[in-house]
Image (tube, rainbow, N blue to C red):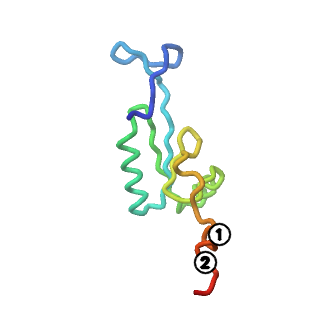
Amino acid sequence: MRCCHRLPFGPGRAEIDGTKEMAAKRKIEVFSAGCATCQEAIEVIRRAACPSCEVIVHDMRDGEVAKRAKGLGIRSVPAVVIEGKLAACCAGRGVDEAVLRAAGLGRPA
């Protein structure tokens, strides 16, 4: 399945082989910690991306990247942001103290 779609003819489109396609790229950002799980996710995203997708990988070990990620609502990695919006599959994850306590954290065995 392709992530990008063709838009009707109009300004801002480039003609390629007699058809008009969008000249702009869809921005796909992957926030990664560099681990094997993140690398696997990056490979999946790159394989699924179409020619109109620009895949950018951010290293969460960089303080500025981590700060931006927090502002986007990223709580765990890998995480994917498409056109500035955190993908639904990546939202709401991360450490939740209440869930951990319900599972037994902080209680004697």
Position in image of residue 46 (x %, y %): 38, 44
Front residue of 107/34: it is 107
The crowding category of the residue bearing disc 1, from other C-alpha atoms within 10 Å (few below 14, some 14 to 19, many at least 20), is few
Give the left or right position of residue 38, taking residue 89 as reference. left
Residue 29 vs 7, above or below: the answer is below
Front residue of 34/95: it is 95
For the C terminus, the image quarter is: bottom right
Residue beneath the point at 38% across and 35% down:
1
Residue 42 vs 53, above or below: the answer is below
The crowding category of the residue bearing disc 2, from other C-alpha atoms within 10 Å (few below 14, some 14 to 19, many at least 20), is few
Q: Amino acid at mark 2?
A: Leu
Q: Secondary structure at mark 1?
A: helix
Residue beneath the point at 38% across and 40% down:
48
Q: Secondary structure at mark 2?
A: loop
Kindly check if marks 2 and 1 are in contact, taking CB atoms under 8 A apart as contact.
Answer: yes
Position in image of residue 34 (x %, y %): 44, 61
Position in image of residue 96 (x %, y %): 62, 65
Residue 15 vs 30, above or below: the answer is above
Residue beneath the point at 49% across and 41% down:
28
How many labels sit on residues? 2
Mark linked to residue 82: none
Position in image of residue 91 (x %, y %): 58, 51
Extreme-bottom residue of the structure: 108
Q: CA distance from mark 2 to mark 1?
A: 8 Å
Give the left or right position of residue 14, taking residue 81 as reference. left
> Can you identify the residue that label 2 sits on?
105
Mark linked to residue 97: 1
Q: Which of pointers 2 and 1 lies earlier in the amino acid sequence?
A: 1
